């Protein structure tokens, strides 16, 4: 009884927290998109919105959001449009309560595209674009290279950019490392800044599973897209624990092809189908019997 009481308190506290006003720090609320919103960005944002947001927030302007507590606001509503661009961006990154965080699944550029799409439902909206930074003007065509330092057990990233025709290291840029997984990107270590030589070293977990020979697909991204643009790189390195994963068509995979399904499962499925159709046939026969009995009484 005590356990259920504690669980009830936790659920109630979570609902109260979700219902509270979502306060965004002034610095985050003041953030602006690094690019102008156009028909192209709105169209790209619509596709991202449909894939990631529509299931809860519904169609903009239709008030058909999913019935959660609290109800997710309509993208075209006054409540949603009252947010600054920076506040929208912050909430998409952080998430809260039933709303997930998209910081590891969508890039900052994609989040701005979603905001561009939502702003299309506000005829009074006037965009303010972020001014280019000194770093952004200097760091053009940023490229990132990933490598494995076996001696230190670290994944190393090298950041370079072109200034005119000269390649130079990118110093002081914050970088994040992820391991690609089926359902999103798994953060590896904390965000780190490049040194004067444009180098970043990430500590890699010794127990992260890889494929059969230990390969792991890694993704490295620059976090400051306003300054450096959407710079990222992918590489497959043998840094994980070799792991043999049975294929979906292996004997244990009952959801695989029919030839791999156990005999008992096939019989159980056929029996369930026959039982269902038999029940339907029985109901139909009873309805006919009632109809005939009623017809005879009228005669």
Image: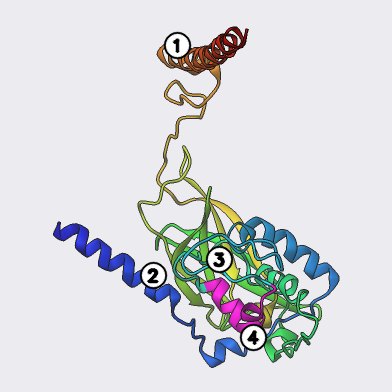
Q: Total of numbered circles in the picture? A: 4
What is the quadrant of the C terminus in the image?
A: top right
Q: Is residue 176 above or below residue 240?
A: below
Marked residue nearer the N-terminal end (3 or 2): 2
Which x, y percent locates residue 277? 54, 15
Residue at 32 percent of width and 72 percent of height: 13
Which x, y percent locates residue 275? 47, 14
Residue at 41 percent of width and 60 percent of height: 204
Residue at 54 percent of width and 13 percent of height: 290
Which element carries disc 2, helix, strand or loop?
Answer: helix
Asked whether the beta carbons under mark 1 and mark 4 sit within 8 Å of each other, the answer is no
Q: Main secondary structure of the magenta part?
A: helix
Marked residue nearer the N-terminal end (1 or 2): 2
Number of residues whose C-alpha sits closer than 10 Å to that of mark 3, classed few (under 14), some (14–19) or many (20 or more):
some
Q: Which residue in the protein does label 1 denote?
A: 267
Which x, y percent locates residue 264? 40, 13
Number of residues whose C-alpha sits closer than 10 Å to that of mark 4, classed few (under 14), some (14–19) or many (20 or more):
some
Q: Which residue in the protein does label 2 denote?
A: 15
Which x, y percent locates residue 286? 52, 13
Marked residue nearer the N-terminal end (4 or 2): 2
> Mark 1 against mark 2, which lies toward the viewer?
2
Asked whether the beta carbons under mark 3 and mark 4 sit within 8 Å of each other, the answer is no
- In this picture, which residue range is highlighted in magenta? 76-93
Where residue 171 sits, quadrant-wise, is bottom right
Q: Which residue in the protein does label 3 denote?
A: 102
Q: Which residue in the protein does label 4 denote?
A: 84
């Amino acid at each position: 009884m005590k356990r259920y009481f504690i669980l009830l308190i936790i659920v109630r506290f979570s609902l109260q927290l979700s219902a509270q006003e979502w306060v965004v720090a002034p610095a985050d609320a003041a953030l602006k998109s690094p690019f102008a919103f156009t028909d192209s960005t709105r169209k790209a944002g619509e596709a991202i919105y449909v894939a990631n947001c529509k299931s809860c927030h519904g169609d903009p302007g239709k008030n058909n959001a999913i019935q959660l507590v609290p109800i997710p606001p309509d993208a075209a509503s006054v409540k949603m449009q009252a947010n600054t661009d920076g506040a929208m961006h912050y909430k998409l990154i952080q998430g809260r309560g039933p709303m997930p965080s998209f910081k590891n699944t969508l890039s900052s550029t994609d989040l701005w595209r979603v905001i561009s799409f939502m702003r299309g439902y506000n005829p009074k909206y006037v965009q303010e674009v972020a001014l280019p930074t000194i770093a952004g003007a200097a760091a053009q065509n940023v490229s990132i290279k990933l490598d494995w330092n076996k001696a230190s057990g670290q994944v190393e990233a090298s950041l370079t950019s072109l200034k005119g025709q000269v390649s130079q290291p990118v110093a002081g840029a914050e970088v994040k490392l992820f391991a690609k997984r089926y359902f999103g990107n798994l953060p590896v270590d904390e965000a780190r800044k490049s040194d004067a030589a444009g180098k970043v070293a990430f500590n890699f977990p010794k127990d992260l599973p890889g494929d059969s020979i230990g390969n792991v697909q890694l993704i490295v991204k620059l976090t400051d897209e306003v300054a450096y643009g959407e710079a990222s790189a992918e590489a497959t390195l043998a840094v994980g624990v070799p792991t043999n994963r049975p294929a979906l068509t292996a004997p244990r995979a009952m959801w695989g092809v029919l030839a791999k399904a156990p005999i008992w499962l096939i019989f159980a499925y056929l029996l369930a189908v026959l039982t269902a159709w038999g029940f339907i046939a029985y109901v139909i026969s009873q309805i006919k019997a009632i109809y005939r009995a009623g017809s005879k009484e009228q005669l």
